[in-house]
Amino acid sequence: MKRKIQYILALAVLISMTVQAQQPKGKYATFALTHATIQTVTKGIIQDGTVILSQGKITAVGANVSIPAGAEVVDCKGKWIYPGLIDGGTTLGLSEVGSDSRTQDFNEVGDVIPQMKALTAVNPNSALIPVTRISGVTTVIAAPEGDLVPGTAALINLYGYTPDQMYAGFEGVVLNFPNTGRKGFFDRRTDEDIKKAAEKAMTRINSVWEMAVQYYKLDSATKSKGVGYYPEMEALLPVVKGERTLMIEANASKDIQAALKWVKDHKVKKVILTGVAEGWRVADEIAKANIPVVAGPVQELPTRDYDRYDKPYANPGLLKKAGVKVALRTAQASNVRNLPYHAAFAAAYGLGKEEALRAVTIVPAEIFGVSDKLGSIEVGKNATVLVSDGDPFETKTNILQVYIDGWQVPMVSRQTLLYDEFLHRDPGVTKN
Amino acid sequence: MKSIYLKHLFTAMVLVLGLGMPTLLRAQEERTLGPVSGTYAITNVTVIQAPGRKLDMGTVVIKNGIITAVGKGIAVPPEAIVIKGDSLFVYAGFIDGLSRTGVIKPKEETKEKVKDPGNPPPDRAGITPQNDVRNFLSPTDKTVEDLRALGFTTAQVVPYGGMLPGNAAVVSLGGKSADEMVLASKTALYSEFTTAERIYPATVLGVMAKYRELYRQAAQAKSYESLYASNRTGLERPSPDRILEAFYPVIDKREPVLFKAEKILDVQRAITLQTDLGFSLVAANVKEGWDVLPKIKSGNVKVFLSLDLPEEKKDEKKDDKKDVKKEEKAKPDPEKDKLEKRKAEFVTLYAAQPTAFQKAGVPFGFSTLTAKTKDIPANLRRMIKEGLTEDQALAALTINAAQILGMSDRLGSIDNGKIANLVITRKPYFNEKAQVRYVFVDGVVYKYEPKEEKKADAKKIDVSGTWSYSIETPQGANTGKLKLKKQGDNYSGTITSQYADKEVELKTVSLDNNQLTYSYSLQVEGSTVNVDAAVTVDVDTFEGSVTTAQYGSFPTKGTKDPNR
Amino acid sequence: MKKIFYSFALLALVTFAHAQVERGNLLIKNGTVLTVTKGTFENTDVLVKDGKITQIGKNIAAPAGVKVIDATGQFVMPGIIDAHSHAGLDAINEATSPVTAEVFTGDVLNPFQVTLYRALGGGVTTIHAMHGSANAIGGQCETIKLRYGVKDGDGLRMEGAPRTIKFALGENPTRVHGGGSSIVPRTRMGVEFVIRESFSKAKEYMEAWDKYNKAKTQKGFRGTPPAYNLRLETLAEILKGNIIIHCHSYRADEINMLLNVCKDFGVKRLVFQHVNEGFKVAPELAKFGAMASVFADWWAYKFEVYYSTAYNAAILTRNGVVTSINSDDAELMRHLYHEAAKTQKYGNLSDDEALALITLNPAKQLGIDARVGSLEVGKEADIAIFNSHPLSSYTIPMITVVDGVVRFDREKDADDVRIYVDPTQAVDIATIQGGEQEDHCMDGAEDAFGKLFGLN
């Protein structure tokens, strides 16, 4: 009997441990990260410094910071602190299993559907999110994909139980600019057909924009009272007004040029170019238009068989050199965790380490209009930082702790749990 | 006169009423009148008997299809029809090493779905080596007339099909019946790297393996049959298999394998099979063979080079200065210029291929399989421009081809006793203004009026009718019928697809000059797939692509079915 | 007598093939030499003669006329080997039948693919050019060296490398055949059956031929030979141990299944490919002696890789399984050195352990470890030179050498490296790649029409 009770107790402990191991909770407190090397990004590197995280904000940064009473002190001696990394374009949270359309929520029916909001469909419980955030990527654009205007993308922080808790303060309407390139290996249309399809799409976009402008005029003239329910136009209205960013995906050099011209002709006020695979071909023109870009993926093949093999790696550097403001993206769901390595490749092939770091921190924060909250370690910004044992772009560096909006995030994912369980499996080959 | 006519008409009407329409038609048919003599003499003509053997002011006499005299000052037989050859040039008729000239494409029947795509019936897999092109010949096919008009009198032709379409034959481009055309039958076992449609072999991987397996099975069956033939008692009876039997003459080297091998890798793959299996190889319609020359040479591969060349980039004419728009003024683009230059260099390599073969000492003929007939003379001139001499070009068109086919006793030069295949031109053949005036095929003359430089009528294309189309996918071709109807200036139509049970109504059809576009929807596993096609029509063929929003595009081709 | 003649012919053929391969002489001076097997040496030279490494040491004098590469400050490692690639092939999947052992990717080599050059730009020298995974038993694969510049597929072959064949378990074969054509297999049960059935038939075939051949030696023998069948011929070679199985697999249960099948048929040479759940059966793999070739971190692109972990390679290695990291992808292939480095983050592998994942271990899996996979005297001179440690994410491959011939040199790299130019292609059309990663084993089996019309 006694034995049985012991057994049950042991079992209960085991179960509770398992549960705890599988569903550890975040911790919200005042944290003092001390004796760290702090890469502020915007204000240089602070040696042996302290960062205070309190009430979800960074409340103090520096070499001589007094630790508030009640703060939980985390000794970061020999460790580094960086701002959380930002991926400028993913489908994270919108896609769970790549081949299963039932688990994918980034591609709605319709060619012009700006009213479709990615934020709505972000699954806070996606198994992909913990895998991503424990790599130091704390904030991503979750973007819809599809036809001409597939919807509205959202910037999300990778911690929270609802999309609202995750929302990071930026939404942008996505426009896939008509593509004169081939859409991958299986696209065997004739050059003529590609051109025609692009022209047709161009006509469609122009007419949609014209309608949006009309809608805007009507809306202004009637103080919003003369317009009926028209979700597409309502979603485009802030873009026409210049209150919301238009994120224009363009990759082939010709398309980028056409997009620049279109933006100019239609006087679109807030614009980001995304993708820009062949941005290097027309880098000067992008710089001249003064439009920022979210480039990537960096680890990608060249767009043409006669292009130099390293062009995708060199693209961000070449853009930057021409004077373009460059942020990076992985354009992934399952391996957004590799953002630091995309940045490392860009750094090695011409962008340089410093600019590469900016391209995944302060630059995207600025481009998305959230540089008051994210992108660097400064007082007043969100407490979204990572602690590492080295340069987070270096492959073998371990991210030791991530804080998102002041929450100390549990550093586990399904992948780490599987490691813990199976490194030394028990039972091994024989069961008894 | 008039009354007689009326009387005839009256009789005809009685006949119509009494005996019906066919009689009337027959009554009005023009009777073909044969020539008054089978003997011809072409006099006073420049005779190019063979490359390097030229005879000025000579005479060629032919009798009942055979060349009976060639030379100077030859007496003209009294029964001869005389063609005054003053200022004309006569050559031996040209030989095409591989084409489907005069070969009828079998009607495509709607086929049942193959239940086990890994083990399809051989004909569905494209394995029909027992076929004989003689069963598909038609002397009246327009392709015969077209190729003949260029001076070709002989062609090695092959049936349509897949990886093993059947036996080739060497035919005359004339004659009244299929049998009359045939000069030699079973001249080669024709093979292609053509894959089957979503059934085995659906890739070149499968074609290579299947080829090896069939060949070795045939060798095994053949050797067992001879064992059986030596003493039948107590042995299992070999089961006859016409597919394997088709390989027997190849195994005995009585018949070569004629492989369509256009790209460099096709040539290499054909040689791989030759090396593995040991047959005699003729690589045909070769377009990219120059880098395989050492292998071709060491493998003793015989070659027919393609007369199809990639298009040259047209020099943008500077004379349309009138409408140089300011904004269109092309910015200098050094990158593009460099690429265009490389491409042009490569296009040149294709035209220089015969020269490369010549230099390597590999004899070759030509084949017209994929060449546009009207481009052939110009393509020959491009080859000559890249270093081939006119004699070498002529040799490839005549005596070399005859030798490769093993028929130089009958074909390939203007010599006594050879078949009376001749081409007579106004200027030397490789001159841009040559103009073919007469072609003799088997002693039968075809006459061509001097051409006026006429502008092509920009006559409106009518696309109505039934078209057979195929869509080329990496898995093989998808085929069906496209039926177009004209109503006023507009078209409508239907399409069949292997992915639809019945004809599907086209959603849109439009024709702009020669640009035809149409669209339709298919229901596939409960979801709608919209297909948009855009093709360029050239009289009775079209080429272009189909596009689906979800899955990209594929090239498509079509040919118009003959009107019934 | 006849046999003698055959072996003579074979010898002549091999010699001929050898004669075609270009072999170079080189002296690589003063680099940090990562031998992988014998340690790391600073300021060390590597001498190459006639395509082979003849000396590794300090201050080697350059023989007359030998090209010298100054590798001061640079890192010299064995050429990277990719045990899973579909590059250099014109066709990948003969997806029409659940068993296609008779087909051979060596028949469809395409030396003109720029992909091969780009892989050299990532330090890769040898790849396993594999058949796809549409079939339970796919085609035979070819091990090729990236001698980019040759114009003949034969020039790519790594002559003398053991024969290999692709098998595939799980979603792909069941979807293509069971789902697409209503032919077994539709489930993992069916996959096992198809493999067992094939092996059994091959065994019968082999025995029938043995019997016939034996009978034939009797004087006056007259009899019917078994019908020649190329598929069964190939399968019989697997049973005889002459062909190494490389099996596309993901889930632990299916891996375990193939181990059991192979045990039953006495098949010992077995490498699992992808094997995302290999970590779950690592002890079983180790006990069998089966090897594993994995992605560093790819997952979630389909359901059977949803329960994956980037620690897979480390868990397998720690459990004694010979493990490699492969690409299966033309882009990933360009930075296998970086993929290998991920095992230092996910599982703390040492530098040599991590480097072995892309050199010695894949060489073992392809049966070519006596010739390549490490920098040792006597081995073939397939060498990659990096500007910093190859496991750093900032490193850049500078020079790649195959058989002692420099096939890639970043300093001399030309923009346009195409060997053949398509004379019909427009010069300024870009191909924009899609974003999400997935394995490419189904290429060709899942073209647009395949997806449209029921292969899915």
Image (cartoon, grey):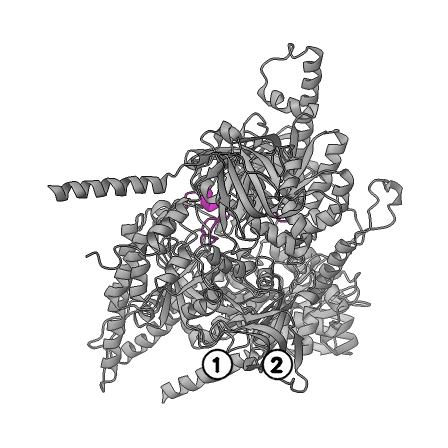
Q: Position of residue B510 (x, y in %)?
A: 63, 33
Image quarter of residue B220? bottom left
Main SS, magenta region, reads loop
Q: Amino acid at mark 1?
A: Val
**In the image, residue C454 lies in the stretch drawn in magenta:** yes
Q: Position of residue A191 (x, y in %)?
A: 66, 46
Circle number at residue C14? 1
Say which element carries label 1.
helix
Circle number at residue C25? 2
Counting other residues with Cα less than 10 Å from the Cα at mark 2, is it few (<14), some (14-19), or many (20 or more)?
many
From this view, report whether residue B150 is shown above or below residue A55.
Answer: below
Left/right of residue A342 with respect to residue B111 in the rendered view: right
> Which region shows up in magenta?
C428-456
Say which element carries label 2.
loop
Circle number at residue C151? none
From this view, report whether residue B188 is shown above or below residue B537.
Answer: below
Q: Amino acid at mark 2?
A: Asn
B525 vs B539, nearest the viewer:
B525
**In the image, residue A99 lies in the stretch drawn in magenta:** no
Image quarter of residue C30? bottom right
Q: Chain of mark 2?
A: C
Q: Earlier in the sequence, mark 1 or mark 2?
A: 1
What residue lies at 71% left-to-right and 44% top-to-bottom? A254
